[in-house]
Amino acid sequence: MIYKVLTLDEWQLAKELGKIVTDIDQEDGFIHLSTSRQLGATLSMYFRSSEQVMLLKINHNKVEKTLKLEPTSASSSRKGFFYHIYGDLLLEDVSNEWVLERNSFNIPDAILIEAENDNV
């Protein structure tokens, strides 16, 4: 399963445009995605100041032609492989959506990164 996390403002813009557009994705030239195993660290590291975010489940079959599984850069604190989309991510590619509320313990990033790399 692959997921996209957005701010509520980014979600509102996506609904207006019919596709998901974020600043970080435009800067990097691809759309960042996370697996269920990677979500904890993604939320903690990139959305720590958000009280609410949108979590989108992406239909793998609809994006497979533009989807690549790529290693992280050597300078990243996160290791392993992440899915990226090179092209548009349309609203019709979303199979489910949830609003996530900030209401949990803040696990240190180092532990979340360790968990996403744990093969046990």
Image (cartoon, rainbow, N blue to C red):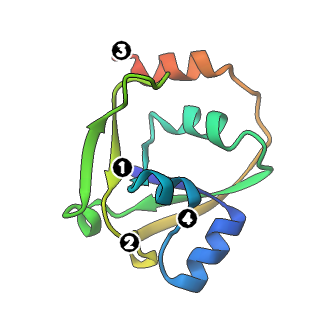
Residue that carries the numbered disc 1 in the rendered image: 1
Number of the front mark, 3 or 2: 2
Mark 4 residue element: strand
Residue that carries the numbered disc 2 in the rendered image: 93
Dot 2 and dot 1 residues touching (CB under 8 Å): no
- The alpha-carbon separation of the residues under discs 3 and 4 comes to 29 Å
Observer-nearest of 24 and 41: 24
Dot 2 and dot 4 residues touching (CB under 8 Å): no
Residue 22 rendering spot, x and y as whole percentages: 56, 62
- The amino acid marked with disc number 2 is Asp
The part of the image, by quadrant, that contains residue 104 is top right
- The amino acid marked with disc number 3 is Val
Residue that carries the numbered disc 3 in the rendered image: 120
For marks 3 and 4, the one nearer the N-term is: 4
Residue 117 rendering spot, x and y as whole percentages: 40, 20
For marks 1 and 4, the one nearer the N-term is: 1
Residue furthest front in the image: 27
Q: Residues within 10 Å of mark 2 (few under 14, many from 20)?
A: some
The part of the image, by quadrant, that contains residue 70 is top left
For marks 3 and 2, the one nearer the N-term is: 2
Residue 74 rendering spot, x and y as whole percentages: 37, 22
Observer-nearest of 101 and 89: 89
Mark 3 residue element: loop
Who's the residue at 34% across and 26% down the image?
Answer: 80
Residue that carries the numbered disc 4 in the rendered image: 97
- The alpha-carbon separation of the residues under discs 3 and 2 comes to 31 Å
- The amino acid marked with disc number 4 is Glu
Q: Residues within 10 Å of mark 4 (few under 14, many from 20)?
A: some
Who's the residue at 74% across and 27% down the image?
Answer: 106
For marks 2 and 1, the one nearer the N-term is: 1
- For this view, does 23 lie left or right of residue 37? right
- The alpha-carbon separation of the residues under discs 2 and 1 comes to 13 Å
